[in-house]
Amino acid sequence: RRVMLASLPGAAITSIQIDGVLHEFSTVQGVTEDVTQIILNLKQVALKIDSEDAKDLEIDVKGPAEVTAADIQGDGDVTILNSDLHIATVSDGAELHVKMTADKGRGYSSADDNKTRMEGLAIGV
């Protein structure tokens, strides 16, 4: 059973970059959740990618707003399966700009594996 789970293909967000954020322990001005909570919420996004290439995704929201997975923008090859998932709450006058990379893979990849693969690009998820 464990071998079958480890060999299932899937897609996930592998890195994120939030405007004005240098590391995962920061906060974003005007956003209720801290960066760690936003990362944990983004890790729960279920994706389907219809191509073999890594895909760039983006969230661009001006407050006041409740940001959900439905606010993630990408090309036609990416489908968000749980679009009602809460990601963050943006207060009045604040903005949230997030750039993400989504990729297909098999099994589990740790954040350290992603960091070495994408050296210096963004916060590994």
Image (spheres, helix red, strand yellow):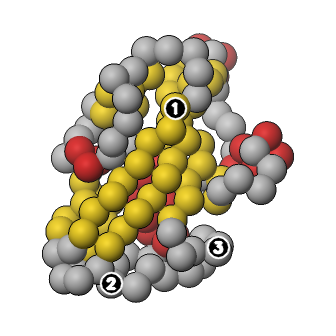
Q: Do the numbered discs 1 and 2 sit on residues whose CB atoms are within 8 Å?
A: no
Q: Which residue is mark 2?
A: 30
- Residue in the image at 26% along x and 38% along y: 82
Q: For residue 109, what is the image quadrant?
A: top right
* Residue neighbourhood size for the residue with mark 2, other residues' Cα within 10 Å, grouped as few (<14), some (14–19), many (≥20): some
Q: Nearer the viewer, residue 2 or 33?
A: 33
Q: Nearer the viewer, residue 76 or 45?
A: 76
- Residue in the image at 76% along x and 50% along y: 115
> Is residue 112 visible in this depiction of the protein?
no
Q: Which residue is mark 1?
A: 55
N-term mark: 3 or 1? 3
- Residue in the image at 60% along x and 71% along y: 24
Give the SS element for disc 1.
strand
Q: Nearer the viewer, residue 53 or 88?
A: 53
Give the SS element for disc 2.
loop
Specify the label residue 31 is tagged with. none
Q: Marks 1 and 2, Cα distance to the nearest angstrom?
A: 28 Å
Q: Marks 3 and 1, Cα distance to the nearest angstrom?
A: 22 Å
Q: Which residue is mark 3?
A: 23
User: Residue 12's x, y, as percent?
Assistant: 51, 36
Give the SS element for disc 3.
loop
User: Residue 18's x, y, as percent?
Assistant: 51, 65
Which amino acid type corresponds to the residue marked 3 in the rendered image? His
